[in-house]
Image (spheres, coloured by chain):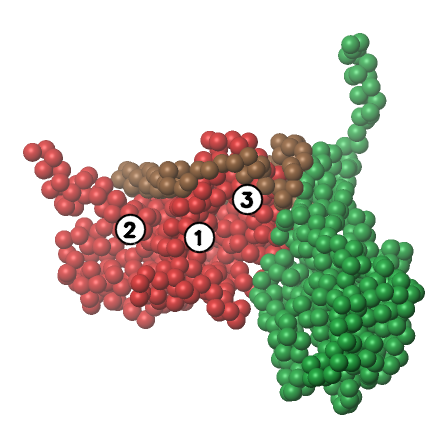
Amino acid sequence: MHMWETIKGSFEYGHPGFTGLSALIKIVYLMLAFGPGLASILTWMERRQSSLMQDRLGPNRANIGRFKAWGITHFLADALKFMVKEDFVPVKAHKFLFALAPVLALAPALIVAAIIPFGAPLCWGHLTEIVPTGTCGQAVDLQIARLDVGILFYFAISSLSVYGATLAGWSSYNKWAMMGGLRASSQMMSYEVTMGMAVLSMFLIYGTLEPGAMVAQQGYWPWQWGIWGIPTALSFFLFLTAAIAETKRTPFDIPEGEPEIIGYFVEYSGLRFGMFFLGEFIEIVFSSALMVTIFLGGWHLPFLDGLADRVPNIAFVLITHGAWIVKVFLFTGFQLLIRWSLPRFRSDQLMQLGWQRLLPVSIANVLITAGWILYSR
Amino acid sequence: MNHDPTATSQKRRVVLGVRDVGDMDAPELPSESIPLNMGPSHPAMHGTVRMVLDVEGEKISNVDIQIGYLHRCFEKEAEHATYTQIFPYTDRLNYISPMLNNVGYAMAVEKLLGIDKKIPERAQYIRVIVGEMARISDHMTCLGAGAMELGAFTAFLYMLKAREWIWELLEEVSGARLTHSYMRIGGVSADLTEGFMPRLRDILTKSRVVLADVDKLLTRNRIFRDRMDGIGIFNKEDCAAWGVTGPVGRSAGLAYDVRKDHPYLVYDRLDFDVPIGSVGDNFDRYAVRVEEMNQSMRILEQAMDQIADGPVLVNDPRIVLPAKSETYNSIEAMIAHFKIIMDGIRVPAGEVYSFTEGGNGELGFYIVADGTGRPWKCRVRPPCVPAVALLEKILPGLFIADVVPTFGMINMIGGECDR
Amino acid sequence: MTSDYIAATLAILAGVGMALLLTMVAQHVGPHRPTKAKQIPYEAGSDVIGSPRARFSVKFYQVAIMFLVFDIEAAFLYPWAVNYRKLSCLGPLQDGVCTAGVSFFGLGGVMVFMAVLVVALAYVWRKRAIGWE
């Protein structure tokens, strides 16, 4: 009887069961399906996109029977290959840390999704009715956790992934891996500072750390988005640079630096390597999602101002969610584009760029933004 | 053990002395140097070479370069092959510009035979044409691979695309994409194919576009320049002392190009410039190679204008195989064919050193003949060995990451270096 | 809200759970055929010389210290940034809009803070702790 009450309660707004169930559904959808799914497709897209840029074919063969779709199923073949490959652990490696490192590389990349709003709030019980913005009494946010610390949670969790790289390097008992781990840790730490500073001017403007509130402050039109304005555009470019450096991709792929030092995961094989690989792409997805949230209007869709007053709530939510997906997808595509166009920095040049160029500029940007807010008052 | 703690502490105090706290430029704390194997199986060590680096953090304090992982006994094998049979071996010396090795070797044997002045003019022009094509493909591979190792993968594939056009044309002429063996002692194995000239002109036009694209991607790219400028500086004196020639020597200001200083074939009739670098760093080596490709294209255009019809092999039955139809139909030709194939071309006893401008510099062949159809000794002067040797002096003090562009711009080719 | 923190905890559990699940798959699905040669650490194809547990350069440690200093200072700035509008207003905010006069307390305070930060950065710069010079 008690069990039945709980199950029934799970469909009633405000009941603890309802809160838990909706959170779980959002977690499964965003963190376990959308993130890894888009990341997997990106692994294929990166190769395919680069092949188009470089005048070659790229991976276009993978298929399931008749279903080919330009070889998009390549990522499934990759996943299968990772799984059935030998899981190899070097004999001198520190077994526990060796196993822990990929977990630390993948888990934070997934967890950061918790604060990202991915659509307009759903109005429970009024799904098929027209619900104008702000009039819903039973709103379910399309955001796993509406934390006041918001972006701080993102930084706190994402900085854990530095342990993944460092521990992978150290535990492998391999000098090249060690070198890669050291480089990864110094790079990621340096750029985290820049990242935190660059986004500070956005907090000044929004006056909150909560991503949902940030999206709510932005409007439908591009000139109502966070990126519009000189200090904020500067903040965007600084943050973008630092975010690419955080995901360790060309031109900042010093820790891997394929022909240089093979990388901190040199001793990893099979699915454990796949976890580093997937983690990197998931980081791209969710860092893009974060930038879309802060700078590019979140789930707001241009040209459809006042749509909430015209269509049923469920349609509105789905449209905004679609807009968010398109934005994130385009932004990840942009990040992939950069990779194939630029050579890589040297480690000391990278550090100098971070500490001596980006950091002073972002500090100045914070002060300029603060002054500008006072002036515009 | 007699251990007096006070003595140690006193000694330590003497060593440390009074530190000058105000000195902002005090030397950093010494760290242990870690020995690190780079190669033979390392992505940057193309051509399998092993470098044992001593690194302090990211800096190289000492380097020991070990070559020989691609040793294939070229010189010993050559002693057991007839002069003609050596051509396929030379293809595998500098395997990104095999035609130039072919030319160099053929000229050495011809000098020994005393027929170097009798080579038909058309054959000489063909040698220049295919040789310069090989030089372009050599430099394209070097620059493309160098860019790729710095992460600029797109530039690499652009370069290889253009190289493929050249190789396709060379395949059409010689029958093989890479292992051409197109030269013969006394000329070339076959005349140029029909439609060769228009195709080559077309390739040059298209290649110029590719080079312009790569130029846009790299030359003014800030990251690329930061990685190349002022890194791995070779000075002129060292280059002269070590015997570094070719693009590496020229980038350091050593104005030596065999084609210009000791003209061979028909190079004296062709107008071209020899680019010289001023700094001797990686970027100079890059720039010198780019300019050399442009000059090679100029040479190709002039050679295509000047080339006239004529035979492509000397008319000497002791050196050149008779035509197939004669071999099958006359006893004299068949015997001549048999003798050349089985015994080889009889080269009078003597020794010769002949040198040409290979892709990486002075490519020399030193041959000692004992009067039989096989050389008594065939030694190659590989142009990249001195440059690799000089690296041991250049690399200490640089970063690990600097090994990649520096080694890439040397263009060390394992096949040629280890032989 | 508490429920949001529960949701965040669930998210953390889900992320870690997914990673652990993949690790288990890695351990149990793939084959295990260790050989002696396979288990040598891969050092570019040569026999290993020296130990990777040697002391590495102090420079990496410097970066870690710099990170601690600057990132924590950046974290201190977050609450300031969030409350900046409140700090810049002489009176209380009315629905997020300042009706009273402008206060320079927020800006002035952070100027002092930033000055200390910039001095620290300049010191680190001058000391050449950045890069590898």
Colour assignment, chain A: red
| SS label for mark 3 | loop
Q: Residue furthest left?
A: A1
The 10 Å Cα crowd at callout 2, few under 14, some 14 to 19, many 20 or more, is few
Q: CA distance from mark 1 to mark 3?
A: 18 Å
Label 3 resides on the chain identified as: A
Sequence-wise, the earlier of marks 3 and 2 is: 2
Pointer 2 residue:
A29
Nearest the viewer among B180 and A130 is: B180
- Point out the frontmost of discs 3 and 2: 3
Chain letter belonging to callout 1: A
Mark 2 secondary-structure assignment: helix
Q: Colour of chain B?
A: green
Q: Residues within 10 Å of mark 1 (few under 14, many from 20)?
A: many
Question: Compared with residue B411, is residue B119 higher up or lower down, i.e. above or below?
Answer: below
The amino acid type found where label 1 is placed reads Phe
| Residue occupied by mark 1 | A281
Question: Which shade of the palette goes to chain C?
Answer: brown
Residue A217 horizontal/vertical position (percent)? 35, 57
- The label on residue A266 is 3
- Quarter of the image where one finds residue A285: bottom left
Lateral position of residue B213 relative to residue B116, left or right: left
Residue A355: give x, y in percent of width and height: 61, 48
Residue type at the position of mark 2 = Tyr
Q: Quadrant of residue B215?
A: bottom right
Looking at the image, residue A33 lies above or below residue C17: below
Mark 3: which amino acid? Answer: Val
